[in-house]
Image (spheres, rainbow, N blue to C red):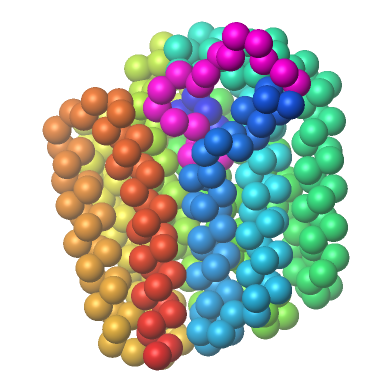
Amino acid sequence: MVNAFPSPSTDSSPEPSPQKPSVLSAYARLIRLQNQSGTLLLVLPSLWALTLASEGKPDPILIAIFILGSFFMRSAGVIFNDLADRSIDQKVYRTKHRPLASGALTPLQALGLASLITFFAFVLVWFLNPFTMALSPIALLLAAVYPYAKRYIHIPQFILGVAFGWGSIMAWAAVRNQLDITAWLLFAATVCWAIAYDTIYALQDKEDDLQIGVKSSAILFGSYDWLGVGMFSVLTMLFLGMAGWMMELGPMFYGGILAISVYVIYQSWTLTTKQPSTNYFQMFKKHVWVGIAILLSFWIGFV
């Protein structure tokens, strides 16, 4: 789990090192512009919350704000990650060509871009109600803290889940101007979901992480990684089901959640056999579709 916040921002192959890199292309690679899986995984829990809190009729303006906000915060997050990990990235084949690790950009340049992106994110926040505005600094704090979690916490994926789940808390507050049990159920589901899919992602870097000495759930679970992923996947579905029950959703929601549960349990079972690194990345990417399927299940539950 060498890549930190947000882990789902890179792919399983080494990042390209162009022959004649420009500053603009280096900035684009720094924020992973070519790969938006991380943005999608960050925004989906917010869209779940917007859909549930609005009873299936989310405000298009709020949707746009949270999509843009997720892009900005994910971009800032990967910059914070690369600043924290630039010396580590130099030792890992998959990440040694990242702009900060390779010297294509300086830390000062990266901080300048992060500051600009963070400013744009907080401009968006001013379009939300005061309660949601008050919650927003926590999102920035989590983005800044997460890259260091793997140095001290055996399941740093938990902090990733809290960071991603905070978007659902803000989205719920943006609609209802309060927080209730359903919002926290969505938050808990997001934390468990992130632990599940980021453990799969971390399996790519397990050997490197062991040599470098950083921590991850893939290392903690050891040969029982399939069980860890399966357990947190099931917890995700249970929390989502409880959220749907609290909102009195119809039977189509439960049919969707059941189908998704079968898939994630099957995916967990495949981990009982060691996979090539590229397989882990492809399994991880499929969680974008899992998140979309959950969103659709919430929506059709109101039909």
Q: Is residue 183 visible?
A: no
Q: Is residue 193 visible?
A: yes
Quadrant position of the C terminus in the picture? bottom left
Q: Percent position (x, y) of residue 83? A: 69, 24
Q: Residue at x 56, y 58 (%)?
A: 43
Q: Percent position (x, y) of residue 238? A: 33, 69
Q: Residue furthest front?
A: 20
Q: Residue at x 37, y 56 (%)?
A: 289
Q: Percent position (x, y) of residue 260? A: 27, 64
Q: Is residue 69 left or right of residue 249?
A: right
Quadrant for residue 272, please give it: top left
Residue 217 vs 211, above or below: the answer is below
From the image, give the main secondary structure of the stretch colored magenta: loop
Q: Is residue 61 magenta?
A: no
Q: Is residue 204 left or right of residue 279?
A: right
Q: Residue at x 36, y 66 (%)?
A: 293
Residue 49 vs 85, above or below: the answer is below
Q: Percent position (x, y) of residue 54? A: 58, 84
Residue 4 vs 94, above or below: the answer is below
Q: How many marks?
A: 0
Quadrant for residue 264, please give it: bottom left
Q: Is residue 287 left or right of residue 109?
A: left
Quadrant position of the N terminus in the picture? top left
Residue 62 vs 84, above or below: the answer is below
Q: Residue at x 51, y 61 (%)?
A: 44
The span shown in magenta is: 5-23
Q: Is residue 12 magenta?
A: yes
